[in-house]
């Protein structure tokens, strides 16, 4: 295994009723709380009322930062930063999915960093040598794992870049995770969120080292768990056991644990981010479109791992197959699963309709140094065209 340092500063409170049980105690030392949320789902499903009543009962001064959109923009981060500073917020309580959590972490960083946040912390990896505003999150949608990492993936609309670095100091202080809070998610979002977790694992697993290491074995167990529980949750979206597994799988997939000692690829994410920056398409649905096509380009360079994926994740027998056939059978099983759970398989289904724009998007993609091999922008364009 490669050398590593492991740190995760988020304390997790998981399970039914955790907000009612623990929120009061977690916000005890703050008098002004900035409550950050999205475009209204929390008002429809009652989570907003529940949280607000707890904060009001404790006599908190509550400042609301609402309207955080999916794929949050840098403009929105700056709006939140002004509000946090003007209201002298002492902490940010983000209630939502990845977009709200990311925007909350970005505001917390920007409110305390001094200087131009984008240039110093998004355009390149900066050094966070100060304490961002404390953040706590109440997770309403699984998939990104944002609750237990320090990344804030933000879209700079002017520059057409979507990016974010994982800064350990930006980890939320606490995460309240009640699986029942995810029940109101539309089925499509539940499915694509679970696929995003699977994507995080695959991006990590398909990278060196390939020899036996505990990170890859944990990854295989997580992938099998997601596949099984997503099938179950598609059959019965209110299956609490399946939904709890998916929610915790999501955290474990992006809390740095399975990345320990691994190079990590993340090429599909880098492509998906730029598709998002140019077209605003859904992150979790776009990775579903990209993975099988990217892997058909890549598998010969990571044959050991792709054959292991076929056998250990999909249970495919190697008998009578060459190594290449076995590897391709694993990728076919992944593609079949994507169709089975109703995820999109083309960019057009994501609303990416301007084929001419694909070259510009491909040219804007960064390369992943951890991939089995470098994918040049011409090949990224071919992948986009095959996905179109
Ligand atoms: O805006 P609201 O009204 O809250 O509605 C949201 C949104 O429309 C809705 N939703 C969330 N919880 C709900 C609900 N609707 C009903 N009931 C609930 N309980 O779901 C829609 C999508 O929410 P969003 O937060 O955008 O989805 P997701 O969790 O997939 O987050 C996506 C964002 O996270 C970034 C992505 O790039 C994207 O911007 N990511 C963050 C990562 C990280 N910080 O580590 C890693 C990921 O790879 C990803 O890049
Ligand atoms: Zn993702």
Image (cartoon, grey):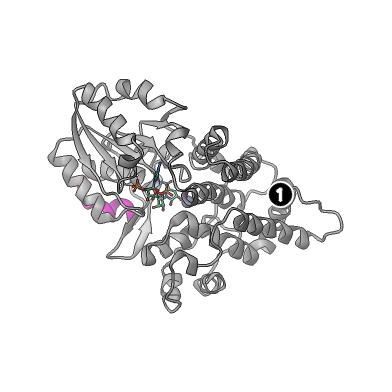
In this image, 344 relative to 43: left or right?
right
- Residue under label 1: 314
Can residue 7 be seen from the camera position used here? no
Residue 242, x across and y down, in percent = 57, 36
Q: Is residue 179 visible?
A: yes
Point out residue 309 in the picture as x, y percentages from the top left corner. 69, 50
Label 1 crowding class (10 Å Cα cut-off): few <14, some 14-19, many 20+? some
**Magenta stretch contains residue 362:** no
Work out whether residue 217 or residue 50 is closer to the camera in this orientation and state it: 50
Residue 274 image-quadrant placement: bottom left
Against 22, is 339 above or below? Answer: below
Using the image, determine if residue 159 lies above or below residue 306: below
The foreground one among 186 and 221 is 186
Q: Which residues are magenta?
A: 114-122
Q: Where does residue 369 sit, x and y in percent of width and height?
A: 52, 58
380 left or right, relative to 140: right
Can you give x and y, in whole percent of width and height, for residue 354 in the image? 42, 76
């Amino acid at each position: 295994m490669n050398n590593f340092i492991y740190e995760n500063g988020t304390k997790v409170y998981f399970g039914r009723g955790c907000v009612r049980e623990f929120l009061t105690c977690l916000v005890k030392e703050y008098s002004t709380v900035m409550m950050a949320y999205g475009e209204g789902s929390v008002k429809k499903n009652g989570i907003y009322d529940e949280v607000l009543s707890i904060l009001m009962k404790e006599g908190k001064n509550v400042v609301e930062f609402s309207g955080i959109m999916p794929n949050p923009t840098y403009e929105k981060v700056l709006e939140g930063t002004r509000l946090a500073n003007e209201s002298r917020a002492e902490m940010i309580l983000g209630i939502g999915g990845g977009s709200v959590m990311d925007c909350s972490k970005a505001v917390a960083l920007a409110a305390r960093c001094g200087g131009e946040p984008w240039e110093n912390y998004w355009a390149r990896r900066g050094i966070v040598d100060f304490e961002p505003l404390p953040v706590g999150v109440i997770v309403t949608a699984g998939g990104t794992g944002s609750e237990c990492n320090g990344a804030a993936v933000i879209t700079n609309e002017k520059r057409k870049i979507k990016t974010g670095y994982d800064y350990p100091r930006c980890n939320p202080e606490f995460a309240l995770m009640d699986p029942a809070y995810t029940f109101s998610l539309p089925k499509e979002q539940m499915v694509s969120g679970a696929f995003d977790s699977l994507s995080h694992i695959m991006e990590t697993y398909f990278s060196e080292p390939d020899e036996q290491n505990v990170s890859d074995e944990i990854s295989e167990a997580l992938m099998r768990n997601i596949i099984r529980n997503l099938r179950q949750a598609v059959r019965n979206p209110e299956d609490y056991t399946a939904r709890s597994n998916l929610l915790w799988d999501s955290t474990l997939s992006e809390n740095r644990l399975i990345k320990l000692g691994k190079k990590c690829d993340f090429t599909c994410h880098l492509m998906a981010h730029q598709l998002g920056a140019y077209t605003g398409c859904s992150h979790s649905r776009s990775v579903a479109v990209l993975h099988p096509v990217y892997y058909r380009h890549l598998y010969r360079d990571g044959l050991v791992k792709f054959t292991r994926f076929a056998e250990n994740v999909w249970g495919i027998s190697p008998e009578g197959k060459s190594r290449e056939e076995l590897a391709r059978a694993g990728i076919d099983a992944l593609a079949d699963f994507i169709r089975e759970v109703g995820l999109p398989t083309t960019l057009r289904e994501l609303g990416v309709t301007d084929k001419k724009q694909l070259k510009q998007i491909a040219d804007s993609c960064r390369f992943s140094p951890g991939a089995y091999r470098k994918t040049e922008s011409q090949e990224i364009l071919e992948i986009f065209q095959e996905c179109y």
